[in-house]
Amino acid sequence: MSRPPQRIAIVHDWLTGMRGGEKVLDAVCERFPDAELFTLVHVKGSVSPAIERLRTHTSFVQHLPFVKRLYRAYLPLFPAAVEQFDLDDFDVVLSISHCAVKSVIRSGRAKHLCYCLTPMRYAWDQFDAYFGPDRVGAAGSAVMRGLMNRMAKWDRETAGRADRYVAISHYVAGRIRRYYNRDATVIYPPVDTSFYTPTPTSTTGSPYALVVSALVPYKRIDMAIDAARLADIPLKIVGDGPERARLEHAALSNGSDAAFLGRLSDDEIRELYRHAAVTLLPGEEDFGIVPVEAQACGTPVVALARGGATETVIDGTTGVLVDDASAPAFADGITRALSASFDRAAIRRNAERFSRERFISEISGVMAALTMGPR
């Protein structure tokens, strides 16, 4: 007798825009269109049609004041919120987690696969970037340190709620091992290499460097601005976030030729990738989809030689990896990239290793292996 179809719950931290984690979710929703979606906060219309199409359940955090803008202010409430999701009717839980949803509570018969974008940054190794004294003041930082210490304790204690972990990079697999004492398989996130393609015509116009990023502290956009000024190349910055006003003021104060373009459509971003002289990744990323999108368009990348970039950028072949996290070192990397003769076809071939089709096949295989056997 054939088994009835398995009921799948997909759990994601929050849905407020199409960043890297949401692009993973988009591919998963395409693969499992009958799944139901659980998330702490959902800003309707902020994500792709494939995501919006799913039946979506939100937490009580959804109804708190100003949550669409200030959802991170409710971090201390996230453990209670994710533990209140009712997943009793589901056979498989797939959490796509960078904060709290790896700790959902599922039924005894269900299997839980966690696709871990990263262990919770705020509570572990990037506290100062978000809640240091220079960000929220000495008193605020002291309060947040106590709260985040409790969050880290809860995060570690609930690491056993997932049956299996899959990490987005070997770098993240190492963090999972360090913080959760769990092993993780590596499946790189999906990049739409059929959409991000080189320009069909030769590029013209003045050269510029490009940043595509949320404007948040750990992305180190300030270093990219300073480095582009030192390398004497205009910088275009795509994205928005809480750091925008500060970064705009800093760029204006030091005479940087930096244009803040805000949020743009995927088509507009693709055109910027295609015509950029270099795309910059100044921060330490867990994987970093932007460098792969840029390479899919045949554009070299200048990246900090830490984290996921060491797995996606081939130094001297598809870009330049910079060892020192300083503006002068990064400016030197930009200068070296501008003077190099890169093979754009080779850059494109490197990006094809991270295709959407490859991701869907690999994540489906892991889910099938996890759920095989008697139920």
Image: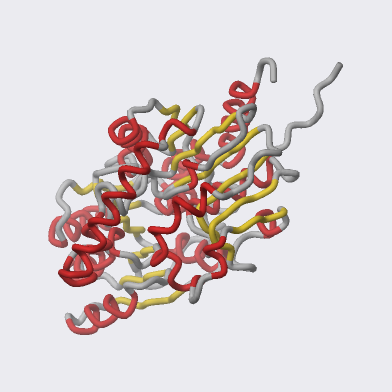
* The image quarter in which residue 35 lies: top right
Q: Is residue 95 left or right of residue 51?
A: left
At 28% from the left and 64% from the top, the residue drawn is: 217
Residue nearest the observer in this picture, 336 or 100: 100
On the image, the x and y values in percent for residue 192 come to 57, 48
On the image, the x and y values in percent for residue 94 come to 58, 38
Q: Is residue 85 left or right of residue 66?
A: right
Q: Quadrant of the N terminus?
A: top right
At 58% from the left and 67% from the top, the residue drawn is: 43
* The image quarter in which residue 350 lies: top left
At 69% from the left and 47% from the top, the residue drawn is: 36
Rendered position, 194 above or below 159: below
Residue nearest the observer in this picture, 274 or 5: 5
Rendered position, 15 above or below 291: below
On the image, the x and y values in percent for residue 275 come to 44, 64
Q: Is residue 347 left or right of residue 323?
A: right
Q: Quadrant of the C terminus?
A: top right
At 19% from the left and 57% from the top, the residue drawn is: 330
Q: Is residue 141 left or right of residue 318?
A: left
Residue nearest the observer in this picture, 89 or 187: 89
* The image quarter in which residue 234 lies: bottom left
